Amino acid sequence: MAEGIFEYENRHLDEVLDKVDTAIAKAENDADNAEKDRSAIDKNFYNDVRINTSSYSGMMDTTISIRQQQQLLSERENSWQHANKRLTTFKEMKKRPYFARIDFHEKGEKKDETIYIGLASFSDTADHFLIYDWRAPISSVYYDGKMGDVEYATPDGTQTVDLKLKRQFTIEDGKLISVYDTDETIGDQMLLNALGSQSDVKMKSIVSTIQREQNKIIRNTAADLLFVQGAAGSGKTAAILQRVAFLLYRYRGNLNAGQVIMFSPNQLFNDYVDQVLPELGEQNMIQMTYYQFTRRRIPNIDVENLQQRFDKKLTDAERKIEQFKGSLQFFKATTKYAKYLGTAGMRFRNIMFQGQPFATKEKIKDIYYSFNTTYNLGNRIEGTREALIRQLNQKVGSELRTKWVEEAVQNLSQEELHNLFKNEPREFKDNDEEFKFLARQIVMKELKPVRNAIMRNRFLSINAQYVQMLRSFPKWYDLKKVGVTEAEWDNHVDKVVNGLKGHQLTMVDTTAYLYLYDLITGKKGDRSMRYAFIDEIQDYNAFQLAYIRFNFPRAKFTLLGDLNQSIYANETSDTLLAELSTMFDPEKTEVVQLSKSYRSTQQITDFTKEILVKGEAIESFNRAGELPTVSINSSHQGMVEAVIEQLHRDRQDHETSAIIGRSYAECEQIADELKAAGEQVTLIRTENQRLVEGTIVVPSFLAKGLEFDSVIVWNTSAKIYQTNRDEQLLYTICSRAMHRLLIVAENDLSPLITKIPENLYIKKA
């Protein structure tokens, strides 16, 4: 690199930082003034309000005056927040204002143009940008183009420029460290520097190292379904988070973070990535797990959690039934059953009042089926509610002169009277009028649970309805397609019934249960949601995906995952792509493959992909490191000692360490043993736990999406990882490692490891 280039870029950096300093000073002044204005309005709020309650018009004036002050306060609050946000952005910009420069020639222009690219835009005048946001249309040239003609998408259509220069910078704390010129998307040196850094308890937002294929994912605005199949460590999750940031930038004013939802594999992962969007200058989208999504709908039922789902053992028949219940066929069958309920078969419950039926289930059924055949399910429920409310209103009048009401009025305490009068004095023309008022208040209060039951559809018996659907299934569906007998099906239904009696549902039943309820009640879904993202798609079934789409009918979907990382042995992802193709318009579907793994060193990737039968498609990135180590020990204690030795080595090299066991029980045992040996480790007990600094012990089903400098795979003995069913699980665990991988086993090593060529690892026996 010529000395003159470094000097020039260093001088340019100093000039930009001077202007950033000016912007910081102005933003600080704006923030101070906004805070003073806000405080002053808040302090003198009622002094500036015109209060007049002596007449109706005076009260209206008072209301208007209060509203004006509230509006004024809100405006100053917004100004203060905006000023503080700008101040935060400028302070971050001071550390690292930009990371790239491109020079290009636009057709029709006399001279070349130079732009610098950073995390946020920055201008010193209205039309003079010193830094362009990485999401701006022109910035795409940096990520996509080699030298020469490069096309990029703009809101006005495709534009072409002649790319003359692509330059990359390493800037730390406002100091220029290095400069690279390259004709590639991202120079290997910059990428190596980023990937070689240590892992943290929070995911980093590295927009400077976005690859060409990742950029296509980030900037795609055409597809209704964007399916990203990416190898472990290919940067798919980072690309998706950056895609959210891009969409919020691209559709600013028409899209907000509350209209974007992301389903993640577990709450631990949510916590891991929760700083990425704020670092990119955006609010966090709605983030939840599928478990949380379903659990909030049925708070009185214990839904099968990750650990239960992972640990359960099924017979061959049960496995077939679960796979069928997770299919589109079962989704369509549930839809068909719900349609049938428009003519017959609905199950209802009595609505009770004072121990007696206010409305019997038979009466409710008569009302439900009294409507015209053109009524859909939602209309029928709405009509039934309205009829029951009319009956309730009539009930209020008939109850006023009953003996229990008369006694209740007579027995009212002074405190109860005040409450019924809402502590406001009332004048009545006679005792009879006062009695009627009090009686009505008492009856209305007593009937409130009945009203709530009606409005909340508690006259439906969804438990009985779901069971009835399952019971009737063999009568109208050929179970040969499922591969089970009627007796096996009936036995399965009995287990579902027993589960419901104990207020429990499996995850696969929960989805069908909720879908049936939504069809019966006419739920239309959240039409305000514009984008839905689903991570680790391989751990979902087609029914779940169809149900999520049903809930967000107007949303565009981005699905990402790795079909090689399906960790639930009881389910299959083999047919997922085929089933997805029937849910979305093929013309508006785009599938992107990310085959190169950037997370791990070449040595770790070359080792881990051999675990898979079809792992040859995974490409390793040319980043050198040490070979994985396989430690075969003659005893359990030998495994523990091998782990301790590695932990000491990791600490010496300042590497973050994670010990990953297959089950929670295994992790609990090794954590206790390490603590007894004097090691400081944190056991991740639940998915709601936060990641912490230092050594952690985590079960396999909670390790999804995470990465660590050093990974120790606990007990890969043949009895623990036995069959090909386990290959995806073991691959998932091993691929969490960035720089160092240790596999420990007792006696017989898993055949999934023994099949790996011995030149790809160091063997210790």
Image (cartoon, rainbow, N blue to C red):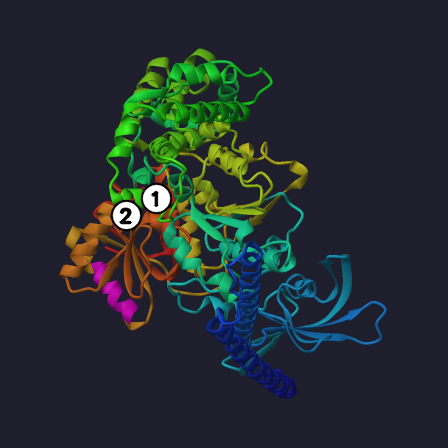
Q: Relative to residue 310, is residue 631 depicted above or below?
A: below
> Where residue 752 is drawn, which disc sits there?
1
Q: Which residue is mark 2?
A: 716
Residues tagged 1 and 2 counted as in contact (Cβ below 8 A)? yes
Residue 50, how many percent across, how many down?
Answer: 54, 66
The magenta stretch spans residue 648: yes
Q: Relative to residue 245, is residue 502 depicted above or below?
A: above
Q: Nearer the viewer, residue 604 or 435?
A: 435
Q: Nearer the viewer, residue 35 or 590?
A: 35
Residue 14, how many percent across, how many down?
Answer: 60, 86
Describe residue 692's horizontal placement relative to residue 77 as left or right: left
Q: Nearer the viewer, residue 242 or 72?
A: 72
Around disc 2, counting alpha carbons within 10 Å, would you say few (fewer than 14), some (14 to 19), or many (20 or more)?
many
Residue 677, how many percent across, how many down?
Answer: 14, 62
Residue positioned 39% across, 20% down in the render: 348
Work out how far the residue at label 1 is from the one at label 2, CA to CA, in angstroms: 9 Å
The residue under label 1 is which amino acid type? Leu
Image quadrant holding the C terminus, namely bottom left
Q: Nearer the viewer, residue 607 or 529?
A: 529
User: In the image, which residues are magenta?
Assistant: 642-651
**Is residue 357 in view?**
yes
Q: Relative to residue 407, is residue 267 depicted above or below?
A: below
The residue under label 2 is which amino acid type? Thr
Residue 562, how many percent across, how many down?
Answer: 48, 46
Please identify the quarter of the rendering in which residue 168 is found: bottom right
